[in-house]
Amino acid sequence: MATLTRDDSTSKLQSGMHHIASVTNVADFVQTEAARNVAPPSPFKEWQNAASKADGARVLFATDEWFASADRLIEDSSPVFDPDAYCVQGKVMDGWESRRRREAGHDWNIIQLSRRTNLIGVEIDTAHFTGNQVPQISLQVADLTAAQAVKMVSGFPTEITLTRLLFGGVQGTGASPDQIGQAEKACQEVEWKELLPRTPLRPGYEPSRMHYFRIPTDDIVGTHVRVNYYPDGGVARLRLWGTYTKETPDKPIPQPAYCPIRTGRTCSVIPHGDCVGNESQLPSRQTQGLVEVSSEVQGGIGVTCSNKHYGEPWHLIQKTLGRDMGDGWETARNPERPSVLIKDPTTNLVASSLNDWAVLKLGHPTNAVDRIILDTKHFRGNYPESVLLEGCYVENDDFLLSGDDSVVEWFTLVPRGRMAPDAEHVYETSKNQVLNADRLISHVRLSIFPDGGVSRVRVYAKEDEKQ
């Protein structure tokens, strides 16, 4: 690896790095000019610093942070030295400094880069660490998916992980040998590649503080870097320069916090997430021998609704699967909804009758309902808490448009029950999950409690019994 060093006049590319094998006295250096509190311009400044704390880089684990937190290593500011600053741990230093190691092994930390990056150059600054700088350092890089990163960090000691999550790195702390062993085991589950081989570091005087390394290949891409101190000591700043990759940064797949219902006595629940890439397995795609009498293809109509702030009821009767949330019926959040939700201990539903509703006209009346599907596809954070589906038979829509229930006899098809996010809810007459299936129906009314969105309402009859 080529090494770019700095002298008083210029920076130049050279092979190898000048290093004094053993330093016992600062007089061993010809120049002992103290490092300034402003770092010199970087030769890599045309690229992005993927180890920038301001841009989102973070330390996930460090073996020891006794004298100075590992978070200081990725600060964007220049390292500063105050000769009069002391604390309980000792001299205050602006960088990551571990205590003098007395156990087996060496100190190390794991940094999550601000973005997945094609790494080009490494910059290490030992400013102000003149008798306590790390003698040798190496860097490793891993290119992890979100799932791999979560698995690795899940293997770290829980107390240390939670402390860092809540408070960041805490000066005056360090992991025990058992905790380090646990974290080491988690790191061994992922593939690490060499970014910088074990390399000597010079002390942090102004003429010797800066260390620049040009990565010799162009294919080093990563999301996480492991910093290895041999065996201990301090470094003021680490910059990892490169170009952010064009690929969309990998993140965990968004999922609802939980699915409140599963397939059971009242209905079958088929999450769309279980059928990604294989939508032909969805119940709504398997309708041999059935006619979707509610669909617009059969002449279905979205008649009216209580609220159409985000979508109209005719969306509910499309034959296709919903494209997105805009391709369904969604209401505004009901301003009268309870300020604190209370569950009915008997039904386990929210103890409120507040609801929005939509009326749909079937393409043709039927008294042979075989199956009903209520689909919340794409509605993951705004699906209804529960729904009720009713039917009626009228020959004139004007009765429904009037909103006067006294002139229309509504009867239950699907009793009020819980909904799940982004899923098809299947109600089968053969399983006694549909009530009044043999009564003549011309219209259905979907009531959602207290509000929310539904993608599709599908009412099926057998082809030879559709009336």
Image (tube, grey):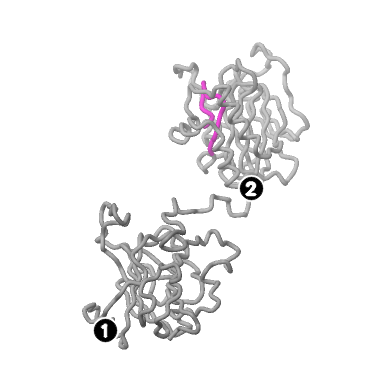
Residue type marked 1: Phe
- For the point 58% across and 54% down, the residue is 248
User: In the image shown, does 161 or 355 lie closer to the viewer?
Assistant: 355
* 18 relative to 12, above or below: above
Instruction: Look at label 2 and name its amino acid.
Output: Thr
Q: Can you see residue 420?
A: yes
Count of marks overlaid on the render: 2
Q: Give the SS element for disc 2.
A: strand
In the rendered image, which residue does mark 2 sit on? 243
Where does residue 49 sit, x and y in percent of width and height?
59, 42
Magenta span: 58-71
Query: Is residue 68 within the magenta segment?
Result: yes
Indicate the quadrant where residue 432 lies. Answer: bottom left
Specify whether residue 341 is in view.
no
At horizontal 45% and vertical 73% (from top left) the residue drawn is 371
Q: In this view, does 42 lie to the left or right of 197?
A: left
Question: Is tag 1's residue or tag 2's residue first in the polypeptide sequence?
Answer: 2
For label 1, count other residues whose C-alpha is less than 10 Å away and answer few (under 14), some (14-19) or many (20+): some
Q: How far apart are marks 1 and 2 (CA)?
A: 65 Å
Q: Answer left or right for 343 relative to 223.
A: left
Position of residue 321 measured from the top left corner of the image (x, y, whole percent): 51, 71
In the rendered image, residue 299, in percent from the top left (x then y), is placed at: 44, 85
User: Toward the viewer: 4 or 228?
Assistant: 228
Q: Which residue is labeled 1 in the image? A: 399
Front residue of 206 and 260:
260
**Residue sitting farthest toward the right:** 15
Mark number, residue 370: none
Q: Quadrant of the N terminus?
A: top right
Q: In this view, does 209 lie to the left or right of 289?
A: right
Q: In the drawing, does residue 351 fall left or right of residue 328?
A: left
